[in-house]
Amino acid sequence: MNSEALKLNTMRRTGRLLSLLMVALVVTPPLGAVADEREEQWKTVEQMSAEDKALFDPATSTPRDAAIPYIPAEPYPFQAPYTAEEMGYRSAEFVHIGRWPQAIVDVFGVVTSSGYINQGVSVSYTALNGRPGLEGYIHDVKPGEPYARWTMFDTFPPESEGTQQLWLPYRTDMEHRTKMDYYIYSEQLRRVRRQPQPLRDQRFPDNSQTFDDVIGRDPWEMDWQLLGTDVLYETIRFPNTRPTITQNIQGQFVERQTSAIKMMGDDYPHYRADGGIDTFVLKATIREDWLPGYGEKTLIFWVDKHLFYPLRMEKYNAKGELMMVEVRLAEHENKARGDFGYAALSTVYWNVEHDLVGFSLHDGQLQRDWTPEEEKMIFTPEFMRRKWLLQPIKSQAVIRDPEHFYLRPRLYPGKFPGERNPAVPAEIQARIDAQEAAGHLVFVTAGGAKSAETAPAQ
């Protein structure tokens, strides 16, 4: 996400008071009423169906690749039955930004527990140095070399318009640990500045997600375990105050009913008859030899059984405390890539420690085959001095009011006890209870009055 835009916006933010709906006025049933009845569909490995067990290889040690000894010998994308490690590799295909050349507009923001909302909009271009997909990332780029180039041009808020960034993320291993070269062009300074590499496990300023949440973690940096199976009926949750959302679809603005948006888009062929998605639940433990001193200890992934697309992720620290919940809505954006063409439409990140709810929505997604001349021209620090927005992409997805913000994801406290502990402090649980009763976020100031602020709308 564009941390520079958030910093600039923070320095110039403008607030206005909004009146919030009182819980007593809400007559709709709690949002959790239906989903809670379905919560007991999770199963441990021992309880899995014969069909699911046939897809799972319980081996914890498999032959390794002769050229790259830390990856499996079986050629990616593997064949069933899958080990837990192979499931983890398959899920790593689907990072936050699709693994193919493209142009998108990223609308992102965060809301605090007191109701201050901060947002930005950035047009982003992506080019690759190898083949699309995880296979190209593993085999086409040597460790220590950049595998992609991302340029970002801020268009909102107005005071940040023209600020640009260039990210050069690297293919890494134990010997080559540099993850990214990072440049910023500031409209105010009129200079390109190289920035220090962000700490991978630290969240961006004024936001809820970390650098690795955006770039992605390499699957060989973790040990993998299958916990079992589950059924998801929702991921991102829209409030009852936001019945529609406007999306840029192939250059056309389309108003969609939020209640009709499906977890993996309309053409995903594997929905259950009741609308749920069957998932494998994976536990990934950070390897200290690969990531010494890393602030995250374990990650729990819910991945669909057919594509291994990660729909939900939980992060826990070394004490077993819940740090963050990430949930996604996906669409089949690149049909030429078949099952590997799914990409995040929207992602919500809930940082539990600070009770920050952040989001990133990828609007107007376009596959883009850059010419060699375009790649040489656009994806360089020098190009940012030109202040040239090569392909403008518009969006109307900025959230106008804090009470229209996405809800905190569900916690599912009864699932997989002993492997996960999604407990939260009492004051945060009280906010969750108020949210569930109202159907939207409820903000309480230090003085007890319900109020909220928002940056000016686009």
Image (cartoon, rainbow, N blue to C red):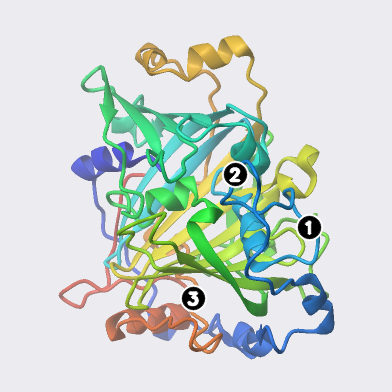
**Can you identify the residue that label 3 sits on?**
439
The N terminus: image quadrant: top left
Name the amino acid type tagged 3: Gly
Q: Is residue 446 left or right of residue 296?
A: left
The residue to which callout 1 is attached is 268
Q: Which mark is residue 289?
A: none
Earlier in the chain: of badge 3 and badge 2, it is 2
Cα–Cα span, label 3 and label 2:
50 Å
Give the percent coordinates (x, y) of residue 110: 36, 55
- Does 375 sit left or right of 131 as displayed? left
Q: What is the distance, in whole Å, between disc 2 and disc 1 at their CAs?
A: 34 Å
Q: Which of these two is toward me, 240 or 354?
A: 354
- Residue furthest to the left in view is 447
Above or below — where is 26 with respect to 298? below
* Residue 458 shows up from this direction: no
| In this picture, residue 201 sits left or right of residue 253 | left
First in sequence: mark 2 vs mark 1: 2
* Label 3 secondary element: loop
